[in-house]
Image: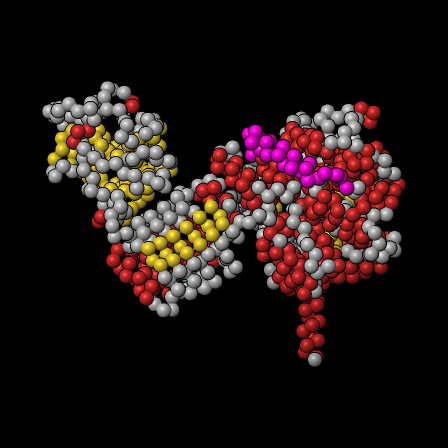
Amino acid sequence: TNILFQLLENNIVTFVKHELRKMHKVLSQHKPPSLETENEDVMEEAFEKEMRNSKEAFEKITLNFLRRMKQEELADRLQRTPAGAGSKLKSSLKKKFQSVFEGIAKAGSPTLLNQIYTELYITEGGTGEVNDEHEVRQIEAASRKPHRPETTIRQEDIFKVPPGRDQPIRTVMTKGVAGIGKTVLTQKFTLDWAEDKAHQNIHFIFPFTFRELNVLREKKFSLVELVHHFFTETKGICSFEHFQVLFIFDGLDESRLPLDFHNKEILTDATESSSVDVLLTNLIRGKLLPSALLWITTRPAAANQIPPQCVGVVTEVRGFNDPQKKKYFRKRFRDEQQASRIIYNMKKSRSLHIMCHIPVFCWITATVLEDLLETNKRAILPRTLTEMYIHFLVVQTKVNKVKYDGGAEADPHWSPESRKMIESLGKLAFDQLQKGNLIFYGPDLTECGIDIRAASVYSGVFTQIFREERGLYQDKVFCFVHLSVQEFLAALHVHLTFINSGVNLMQIDQPTSDKFKTKTKEPKSLHENAVDKALGSTNGHLDLFLRFFLGLSLQSNQSLLLDLFTQTKSSTETRCKTVQYIKEKISENVSAEKSINLFHCLNELNDRSLVEEIQQSLSSGSLSKDELSPSQWSALAYILLSSGQDLDEFDLKKYSASQEAFLRLLPVIKISSKALLSVCDLSVRSCAALSTVLRAPLSCLRELDLSNNNLQDEGVKLVAAGLKTPTCKLQILRLSGCLVTEEGCLVLGAALTFNPSHLRELDLSYNHPGNTGVEVLSAHLEDPGCTLENLRKNPEQNLDCLLSPSDSCQLSIDTNTVSRKMRISGDGRKVTHVAEDELYPDHPDRFDVPPQFLCRDGLSGRGYWEVEWGGQALLAVSYKKIERKGNTHDCLFAWNDHSWSLRCSDNGVFSVLQNKAETTVSASSSSVSNRVAVYVDCPAGTLSFYRVSSGSLLHLHTFNTTFTEPLYPGNDFLVNVKLS
Ligand SMILES: Nc1ncnc2c1ncn2[C@@H]1O[C@H](COP(=O)(O)OP(=O)(O)OP(=O)(O)O)[C@@H](O)[C@H]1O
């Protein structure tokens, strides 16, 4: 032990000497040094924290001794070093952020941030583009991964310079819809710093909220004073220029500061006084404290207040993905059984599961389900947003009763006081929503008949609904815990007003004075007025309100609110009329945003024809697939999923026969058991997505029709990868006309060897399986261990022709159509261009002017042929009715709506033409071969062109249309064409 103690003494003495030397250095300098000296030692992470604690402790000891030695001045200076101020700030921020505000704080049971914090899905949001959509409409957007790879960002890397960028990031703007977790994210970041867990390169973090800053809008401060005002711990430090400082400004959307970036007032001195908005604009522009880091969070609609050039990186919080949702509930409910039960129920309800990608909904769901499942194990879970919020309101009232009034849970929920409270809050919510306000001050409350002194009781009672925040020493500011709660209470208010006094608050151009309010007993016009009003709003601020409002008109929902409602009469009839009215509006060509919200409304009204309505809008083009943004697509998928309707059979053609629609509606396909996807212009990209569906452990897909899509072997391999997963229970797979060759067949065969016990039917007709392909697959038919019983191969009998180069169409040229500029040779299958006119007889079918011809037989089924050309040629198919005489466009292939063609040239440039429009489809310089293939499927309405390259086909283009007459192959050429 002697040696040990000797060693210990040596170590401690070395440490103390080292620390004292540093302190000496610090105190003998004029300016506060950067903390780099503090971190000069390279320490291991775990060791680092211990060391820092020791250093802090030693600093205390030194201070203590200095003061005992009456060296007050030195002690003060030492305390003002960044290490001293930093650690004080850390401990105060630790206290502030270790618990999350969830409304229950007042009841004395804080939720610990570290305990519930669940990783969020954050992506880099590209440029600082303006997005003034109302966030409600983006709510559903985030839950599913789009097909484009996105850059995801970890919380701890927010300020890391992305690879390929050399400029350090000064300002980060984080966007996200309400309740998605922006505030919590900044709090976690700060807490990690304060607890020495991360971001230790930053010396000071100053987390501000716009809510608090609003209160100071009339005052004047210098930047340093502003910091000292909020963070008194740093009062000893008069300049932050030599430190790495991070300013966080949370909730730009709540700002009431006049942030005017055009203002010429330039401020560069951090000790010069000005108004808070001038401080902020200069800080953001980089004029003030250019070395500082800035982090601004905002809901999307308010992001445009900051000029894009002032923002280095935009990130977006997208909420929880599926595994993160689960994690959230596991963290929230420590009792494993309870957590599992809640997760089970959440997942069971399609719409709940989707809603839960927004953390605030997770929290509401947790509150509602905890209560619902406790009181009644078989409780019917909320399906729509309105139901969810009604339950939330009821639970809150109940909790409040038990907690504050000492009532029993079994008491009827609505006491006269709580009823009065809901009425006042509803009025406040509605009045402020109309004005677009999210936060309120004393006078706003008085205006709605809420006593300001009683307001704290209100917020105490309904903490989770109505949250009171104390701006520093000043006015109190109020807001609803979530914008959607405000929208819900506003909707409730309009209903209650109508029921209690017959006043229709939705009347357009409603005069404010009560005496002008018209009384009507007709709820129908109330609903119609509400729809009109929401449709009339340009920024959509009443969209979610409308969803709640119509949802609340349902008798079933009103009865959930028990005696709060005197129920409205003849609801069914009214409901039908409202549904009809909404459908009329949808068909009136309203914008995509508006129609999607109207679909949401139909969903809230439990309308059973919703799925049909969406199909109708998409397929008729009144909702154009090309105009839908990714988030609108997800909203559609969300509505379909939460409609509660039977989506077992999914037929993509009923929506839109396109790859885009396929990828966007994938969440719907995931839950269907039969997916009909034939002739939908799908390619390998769709197969990759399908593969994940097939591999999903609980995939319920049993029948998959992919016929007549350009999948080729590459796509089929991806489908096979899904098929071979043991959990894949697919029974029927149709791949007819998908350009599968032997290679694809072998992979399918291998998949069947891995997973032989489900697939019963495999359709591979109209492909090129080759003999080996057929043999391998046929062997599975014989195998008793394999369930395959029906293998469809190419038909023995030639229909029109087979999609197989070896059995290609035997086309013959109709000599009566051949232009005199062409000479036929070989066995009548080769055509060459001639300078001198040939002496063909006159014929009504002959092309007079253009050098064109048609083949003899028209196709009305399927056909495949190949053409070899030299120079430049035009391959075409045409209806027989194409003009032959005169020099008009009507005679030219692809200059009218009854012929289609592909232009080929020696230099590898291909383009397709139809009805006078030409589109380049491929321009590869290496010409593989001068051979192209045409595949036409008349009943399916597809016409595809391929390049033939050493036996395989490279897709060039597919036309999707409806062929109303038989198609005749034809050619126009400048050099030579040979048919085969
Ligand atoms: N990462 C998280 N882990 C656990 N819970 C979270 C997380 N993020 C958010 N929550 C829950 O969601 C609630 C709302 O989150 P938060 O206040 O951060 O949203 P916000 O994006 O700032 O919304 P707003 O724009 O309305 O201010 C929190 O009170 C908390 O209950």
Q: Position of residue 394 (x, y in %)?
A: 77, 49
Asked if residue 584 is among those painted magenta in the image, a careful observer would answer yes
Q: Position of residue 842 (x, y in %)?
A: 15, 23
In the rendered image, the residue lying farthest to the bottom is 1
Residue that appears at 67% across and 53% down: 381
- In the rendered image, which quarter is residue 442 located in? top right
Q: Position of residue 82 (x, y in %)?
A: 72, 50
Q: Is residue 842 left or right of residue 433?
A: left
Q: Position of residue 70 (x, y in %)?
A: 85, 56
Residue 569 drawn above or below residue 120: above
Residue that appears at 36% across and 41% down: 940
The answer to whether residue 813 is seen in the rendering is: yes
Asked if residue 878 is among those painted magenta in the image, a careful observer would answer no
Q: Main secondary structure of the magenta part?
A: helix
Residue 828 drawn above or below residue 83: above
- In the rendered image, which quarter is residue 167 located in? top right
Q: Is residue 500 left or right of residue 268?
A: right
The answer to whether residue 147 is seen in the rendering is: no
**Range drawn in magenta:** 567-594
Q: Quadrant of the C terminus?
A: top left
